[in-house]
Image: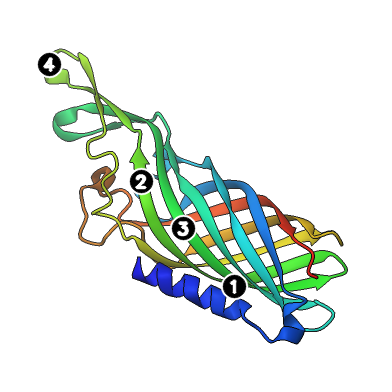
Amino acid sequence: MKKITILAAALLATAAVSSAQAQSVRFGLRAGANYSNLAGNIKNEDAYNNKAGFLGGVMVNIPVLADNFLSVQPEILYSQKGFENKPTEFTGLLGAKQKREGNVNFNYLDVPILLKINAGGFIAEAGPQYSYLLSANDETRTTTTTPALGGTPSTTESQSKRDVNGLNRNELGYVAGVGYQADNGLSLNLRYTGAFSDFVKSDNNAYFNGDLKNARHSAFQLSLGYLIAGK
């Protein structure tokens, strides 16, 4: 949490510009949806599907040029990422047939710092992003059919559904996107966000049988933003 505190302090410090510029600084809100998936070297890739999740939070737009053509826009967002287990059957130990179903949700605090170009309302933006894993919720159900037991299926729920000890809680990534912003501050934004690092710890070989050891989060984001008019 120390890094989050530092980043939040940096965000507030950035907003503390000179009185002449402060009149142009605009605070705002953002809400929308993630369409998240997994990137990287993933084993049994066909078993993992995209899923939808919520994103929302606050932002501040700080102009670099007087006409607001170029600005810096830090944001603090609650962001739901993860994946859906596609009900694909695969062979486990001793020839047992396994099928996994259910969503896996990762709840993050995302802090992107975007360089934003506003060309007559059309937006292009990009920048780095720091993410902190707040919590996880694994809703996976595994059905196992063992030939040695006469082919009788048994269903188990995931163990340690909210355990994040085997995951990397700090993540560095990037954001890039386009959009349109009206004169009243209302905007529609389409973004892509990805990570530079794997979200499963390198020594964790048990998480989903090691399938996601080299997996990274990625997501398309569609959101509405609103920048409150300055004084």
Q: Amino acid at mark 1?
A: Gly
**CA separation, marks 4 and 2?**
34 Å
At 79% across and 64% down in the image, what residue appears?
229
CB atoms of marks 4 and 2 within 8 Å:
no
**CA separation, marks 1 and 4?**
55 Å
Q: Residue 149, labelled with which disc?
A: 4
**Residue indicated by mark 1:** 127
Crowd band around label 3 with a 10 angstrom C-alpha radius: few (<14), some (14–19), many (20+): many
Q: Amino acid at mark 3?
A: Leu
CB atoms of marks 1 and 3 within 8 Å:
no
Quick one: SS at disc 2? strand
Q: Position of residue 26 (x, y in %)?
A: 72, 68
**CA separation, marks 1 and 2?**
26 Å
Q: Earlier in the sequence, mark 4 or mark 2?
A: 2
In the rendered image, the vertical position of residue 3 relative to residue 199, given as above or below: below
Quick one: SS at disc 4? helix
In screen coordinates, is 92 left or right of 127?
Answer: left
Q: Earlier in the sequence, mark 4 or mark 3?
A: 3
For this rendering, which residue is in front, 127 or 152?
127
Crowd band around label 1 with a 10 angstrom C-alpha radius: few (<14), some (14–19), many (20+): some
Q: Residue 136, labelled with which disc?
A: 2
Crowd band around label 4 with a 10 angstrom C-alpha radius: few (<14), some (14–19), many (20+): few
For this rendering, which residue is in front, 206 or 70?
70
